[in-house]
Image (cartoon, rainbow, N blue to C red):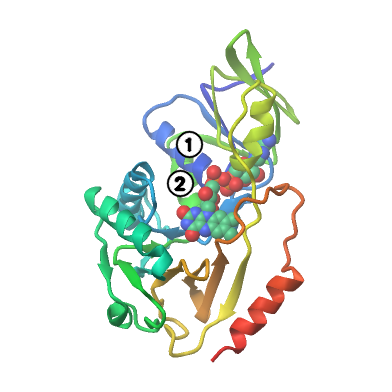
């Protein structure tokens, strides 16, 4: 007998788990999540998980503002611990970045975000460990924090299950089934599942599944390099969390992690497409050299 669901969700990342939780909680019927590997095996498990409101379009800012409240009150709203720690965030710009920083901060303030422009001399006051050398203008967002992406996803998944959702790992969807212009379910490696509603939450892998339905999703997967550096004791210490830093001048960001580690991500070269199933997971020679230089800089 063919299995059925009221709502099928493809993908067990933070999005799939969150959607399952919200639908199951609202009485969405038989909600089933299909994850081809295990929960958090996609980008969620590799995420820097910085929860900020500093974005450049108002729609994203509003979404980030609403989401921040969920992270801040996860235990009460969802249940469990998403590992959220408030750190504050500093955005550093040089002369070329001043105009857009001003415009972004103004737009964010209009959306009700608690953020402010500051001068170079105030940088170390609001975020000890940083200095304002070479900074033309900065902004500080005190409510930014960092979360634990796996704990967040497992938190949503656990609560979704408690509301009756079924989460099946190790089940890859090969096709979304349709009759005329209606979705009727999915074909998986273990057979078909019928459902009148299918939510495609497979992130960059969604493109292939959508293409078969003649839907061209405007998604370009790109490789995102990140390194973990052991920070000096006077930069947040072994246990303390320094502020998140977004340095527009050098196209990097810094995210404090447990055990005296700072994750440094690059925002450079975000437009070169790469295959999400076959990309270089190690550092290139050039990236390795950059890291060595960075580490040896006093
Ligand atoms: C290095 C890095 C740093 C990041 N830093 C931040 C940050 O600081 N702040 C921030 O907000 N965001 C950050 N992000 C982005 C954030 O992690 C992602 O936006 C988020 O994790 C996306 O969640 P998702 O559920 O949409 O996708 P994913 O977690 O990728 O989940 C998609 C799931 O679909 C599954 N799947 C794929 N194909 C199929 C199929 N055919 N059948 C069944 N299952 C399938 C995959 O296995 C995967 O588990 C970062 C990402 C990376 C990689």
Q: Which label is found at residue 156?
A: 2
Q: Position of residue 142 (x, y in %)?
A: 29, 67
Label 2: how many Cα within 10 Å (few below 14, some 14–19, many 20+): many
Point out the residue furthest to the front here.
Answer: 96
Q: Using a 10 Å C-alpha cutoff, classify the residue at mark 1 as few (fewer than 14 neighbours), some (14 to 19) or many (20 or more).
A: many
Q: Left or right? Give the position of 178 relative to 256.
A: right
Image mark for residue 20: 1
Rendering coords of residue 84 (x, y %): 39, 62
Position above or below: 27 against 158 = above
Q: Which mark is residue 209?
A: none
Q: Residue furthest top?
A: 180
Q: Is residue 56 left or right of residue 197?
A: left
Mark 2 residue CB less than 8 A from any atom of ligand 1: no
State which quarter of the image contains the N terminus. Answer: top right
- Tag 1's secondary structure? helix
Residue at horizontal 66 percent and vertical 39 percent from the top: 205
Residue in front for this viewpoint, 261 or 268 = 268
Count of all numbered marks drawn on residues in the image: 2
The answer to whether residue 149 shows anywhere in this view is: no
Quadrant occupied by the C terminus: bottom right
Q: CA distance from mark 2 to mark 1?
A: 8 Å
Q: Are marks 2 and 1 in contact (CB under 8 Å)?
A: yes
The quarter of the picture where residue 183 lies is top right
Image point (60%, 15%), residue name = 184
Answer with left or right where residue 256 lies relative to residue 186.
Answer: left
Sequence-first tag of 2 and 1:
1
Q: Quadrant of residue 98?
A: bottom left
Helix, strand or loop for disc 2? helix
């Amino acid at each position: 007998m063919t299995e059925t669901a009221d709502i099928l969700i493809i993908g067990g990342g933070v999005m799939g788990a969150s959607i399952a939780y919200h639908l199951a909680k609202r009485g969405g019927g038989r909600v089933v999540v299909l994850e081809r590997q295990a929960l958090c095996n996609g980008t969620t498990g590799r995420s820097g998980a910085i929860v900020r409101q500093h974005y450049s379009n108002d729609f994203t800012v509003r979404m980030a503002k609403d989401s921040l409240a969920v992270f801040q009150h996860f235990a009460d709203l969802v249940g469990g611990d998403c590992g959220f720690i408030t750190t504050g965030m500093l955005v550093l710009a040089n002369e070329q970045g001043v105009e857009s920083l001003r415009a972004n901060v103004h737009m964010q303030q209009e959306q009700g975000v608690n953020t402010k422009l500051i001068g170079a001399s105030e940088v170390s006051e609001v975020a000890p460990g940083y200095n304002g050398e070479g900074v033309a203008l900065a902004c500080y967002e005190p409510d930014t924090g960092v979360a634990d992406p796996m704990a967040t996803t497992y938190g949503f998944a656990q609560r979704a299950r408690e509301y009756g959702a079924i989460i099946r790992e190790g089940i890859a969807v090969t096709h979304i089934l349709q009759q005329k212009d209606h979705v009727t379910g999915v074909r998986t490696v273990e057979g078909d599942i019928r459902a009148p509603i299918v939510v495609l939450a497979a992130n960059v892998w969604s493109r292939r599944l959508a293409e078969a339905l003649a839907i061209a999703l405007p998604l370009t997967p790109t490789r995102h390099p990140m390194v973990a550096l052991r920070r000096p004791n006077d930069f947040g210490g072994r246990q303390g969390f320094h502020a998140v830093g977004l340095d527009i001048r050098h196209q990097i960001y810094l995210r404090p992690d447990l055990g005296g580690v700072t994750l440094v991500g690059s925002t450079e070269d975000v437009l070169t497409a790469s295959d999400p199933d076959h990309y270089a997971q190690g550092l290139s020679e050039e990236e390795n050299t950059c890291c060595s230089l960075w580490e040896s800089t006093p």
